C-alpha cells in the first residue's frame, strides 16, 4: 500500500509496468532509491558534522540518525559519531554515563543539556584556543632561541694565534 506521492506515482505507471512485479520493483527503486552520490555526501557529512551552538541535542541526534540511515550505518558507528559531534561538555557527561543504546545516549544528552551550564562549552572552547596559543608561543620561542644561538656562534672571530717561542 503506497501513500501520498508514492500512490500518485503508482497510478501514473503504464499497465506494462504496474502489471509486472519485477518491472514495477525496478521502476520503484529507480524512482525512490537513494543515488550513490547522495550516500557519499551523507557519509562525509556524518563524520564531519558537529552540534551547532543553537541546536538542541534531540534535533542534532535526529539529524545524525537520518544521515546514518542513508548510508546504512549500524548503531555502534552512529553512537560514536554522535558522541564525537556533541558539544564537548555534553559529550563528556554522556561518555561518563557509559550508554549502551541510542536511547540511553539521547537521555544522557538531554540531562547534560539541561543541567550543565551553557558557558561550560564556551569555557572549553576558550581553553582549547588558549592551549593552541600557548603551543604557538612555545614554537616561536624555540625558533627564536635557535636563530639567536646560530647568529652568535656564526659571527665569532678567529682567536689570535699565540706566539710561538715567547
Image (tube, helix red, strand yellow):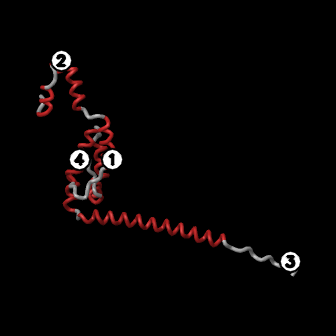
Write the residue at 26% across / 43% down: 67
Cα distance in 3D space between marks 3 and 2: 114 Å
Q: Which residue is mark 1?
A: 47
For mark 1, give the secondary structure.
helix
Observer-side mark, 1 or 2, equals 2
Q: Are marks 1 and 2 in contact (CB under 8 Å)?
A: no
Cα distance in 3D space between marks 3 and 1: 77 Å
Cα distance in 3D space between marks 1 and 4: 13 Å
User: Residue 124, relative to residue 157: is it above or below?
Assistant: above
Question: Residue 164 bears which disc, if any?
Answer: 3
Give neighbour class at mark 3: few <14, some 14-19, many 20+ (Cα, 10 Å): few
- Depth check: give the residue in front, 64 or 143: 143
Question: Residue 16 bears which disc, if any?
Answer: 2
- Depth check: give the residue in front, 19 or 128: 19
Question: Residue 31 bears which disc, if any?
Answer: none
Cα distance in 3D space between marks 4 and 2: 39 Å
| Quarter placement of the C terminus | bottom right
Amino acid at each position: 500500500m503506497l501513500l501520498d506521492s508514492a500512490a500518485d506515482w503508482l497510478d501514473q505507471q503504464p499497465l506494462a509496468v504496474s502489471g509486472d512485479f519485477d518491472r514495477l520493483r525496478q521502476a520503484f527503486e529507480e524512482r525512490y532509491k537513494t543515488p550513490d552520490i547522495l550516500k557519499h555526501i551523507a557519509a562525509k557529512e556524518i563524520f564531519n558534522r558537529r552540534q551547532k551552538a543553537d541546536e538542541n541535542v534531540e534535533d542534532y541526534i535526529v539529524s545524525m540518525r537520518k544521515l546514518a540511515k542513508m548510508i546504512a550505518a549500524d548503531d555502534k558507528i552512529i553512537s560514536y559519531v554522535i558522541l564525537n559531534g556533541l558539544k564537548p561538555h555534553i559529550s563528556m557527561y554522556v561518555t561518563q554515563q557509559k550508554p549502551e543504546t541510542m536511547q540511553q545516549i539521547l537521555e544522557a544528552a538531554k540531562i547534560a543539556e539541561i543541567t550543565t551550564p551553557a558557558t561550560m562549552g564556551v569555557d572549553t572552547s576558550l581553553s582549547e584556543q588558549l592551549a593552541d596559543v600557548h603551543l604557538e608561543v612555545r614554537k616561536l620561542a624555540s625558533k627564536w632561541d635557535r636563530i639567536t644561538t646560530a647568529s652568535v656562534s656564526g659571527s665569532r672571530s678567529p682567536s689570535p694565534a699565540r706566539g710561538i717561542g715567547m
